[in-house]
Amino acid sequence: MPQGTTLPPHMPSHFGEGPSSLERPFNVEAERAVLGACMHKADVIDSVRPILGDDAFYRPAHETIWRALLAQRREDNPTDPIVLTELLQQQGDLQRVGGAAYVFELANAPYGTGSAEHHAEIVREKAELRRLVTSAVRTLQRAQEPGADPEAIRSEVEAEVRAERERALASGQGRLSRFAKDGWSFVKETGADTEPLWGTREKTVWASGESLMIVGAPGVGKTTLAHQVVFARLGLQETVLEMPVAPSRRVLYLAMDRPKQIAKAMARRVFRTDEKILRERLVVWEGPLPATLDKEPDLLADLAAAHQADTIVIDSLKDAVSTMVDDSLAVAFHNARNRALRGGVEIMELHHQRKAAADAPRGQRPSLDQVYGSTWYVSGAGSVLFVTGKAGDPAVTLHHLKTSTGEVGPLDVTHDHVRGTTTVDPSKDPAVLLRNAPGGLTARDLATILFGGGDPERADIEKARRHLSRLVDSGLATKADGIAGGTGGGQQARYYPSARHLTAVG
């Protein structure tokens, strides 16, 4: 039968659905060849199934036969025309597909099994074209309706095109291998050993390929801190909180939460000499996004591509999703985050804490469950910084609750609200503390100073021990091993400033 022609009345098709007379692309012979090959050899189904995807067959009879083949294959039953005819008869579908004669006719198709995958590609391609035609017809109909809204129609078209692209990526021969690679390449070529975006290899605040979330109550300086990292990414400063920041090509700042205040905060750091860099390498999106990221998971990656940005700042997270408390929407946002990260886009997110945690004493260590919303937001983040303090207070504490490598801080920091800068209080720097302790420090001593309280927790003592061990490794400290406990009691290991450390600061 010539391809693209109307089928006989006894063989219904999808053609003719809707008021449009546009021809829907199809290739019946390719469909017949695929079904015949599957009847001839059952394992052909495994080869063509990922290529075809869903609803690929133009002729409804072929779709019914295909689903019967899938059912047989799932049960590891034969797929020959005799067994298949019996199954269709039991389901009441045999006469609807053309009877036993048509099933045997398909099985006798002269194409064999060797070309089944190529024929399946043709079937899939025609199905994709039909969906595009249907979308075009729907758009034409919407545009001709009284009071049609161009912006609403445009948004629907973009959503349909995005869905079709995702469907195309999820089918075809590359569906099961598109993101697969061998173990050596995964370990050595995915950037696992790259320099951090902010911090050092030993103490990474923001790792490449992982999102950074900065959490805190309103007014504690989340935006002030984020802006310093952005300006460092643009090359306008080298460090933030005395830690290096890697340069970026272009930053897209999503100023969704009070953009005017964000502009005023940025203005503290902007000088006339910065104009060229800010015009070329910083793009700011003012106000709400076209859609929430849980509804359009590709939007984040699309925005980065549209503005040629390799860094996106989300200010703030609550404005990017429909609701913060729904686990399913949090997972959808995480998918959006991962799609952008997979495309080489680095992500920083500003977020809020639960109100119950807002009055916690300064310096008290918060926990991840104090971050507002579903736990899946922080679970998917690579690194989480939590800023505690009172709104407007220049002195706050920075806690590193989720780490990529070693923990940073906790750091007592001071915001200069006039200049928009943040500095570290040196009194909580382990190196400074050790240098100012002639009698040395044990891990328990350091934990008491860093984390507060007369009886530090075991986890805090271990963190302090790691701080001291890094000072030993860098040559700034020496260690005197402790003595195991007995009837006379034990003695903890004690760390002392090295002669090099004392000389360097003296």
Image (cartoon, rainbow, N blue to C red):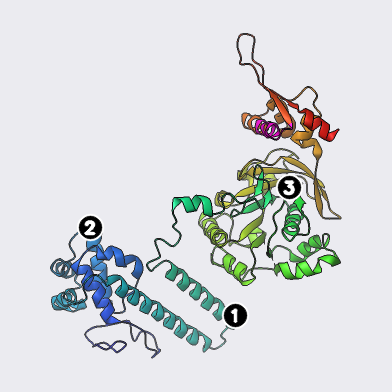
Label 1 or label 2, whichever comes before in sequence order:
2
Q: Which of 467 and 320 is in front in this view?
A: 467
Residue 455 in sight in this render: no
Q: Distance between the residues labelled 1 and 3?
A: 45 Å
Task: Report which quarter residue 80 is drawn in.
Answer: bottom left
Q: The C terminus is located in which quarter?
A: top right
Label 3 or label 2, whichever comes before in sequence order:
2
Instruction: Check disc 1: other Cα within 10 Å, few if <14, some if 14-19, many if 20+.
Output: few
Assign the magenta stretch its main secondary structure.
helix
Q: Say what secondary structure mark 1 lies in.
A: helix
Disc 1 vs disc 3: which is toward the camera?
3
For the residue marked with disc 2, what is the amino acid?
Glu
Q: Residue at x 79, y 34 (%)?
A: 432
Q: Position of residue 379 (x, y in %)?
A: 56, 49
Query: Pointer 2: what residue?
Result: 75
Q: How far apart are marks 1 and 2 (CA)?
A: 49 Å
For the residue marked with disc 3, what is the amino acid?
Met
The range drawn in magenta is 465-476
Q: In this view, does 434 lie above or below 408?
A: above
Q: Position of residue 53 (x, y in %)?
A: 36, 68
Rendered image: mark on residue 243: 3
Q: Say what secondary structure mark 2 lies in.
A: loop
Disc 1 vs disc 2: which is toward the camera?
2
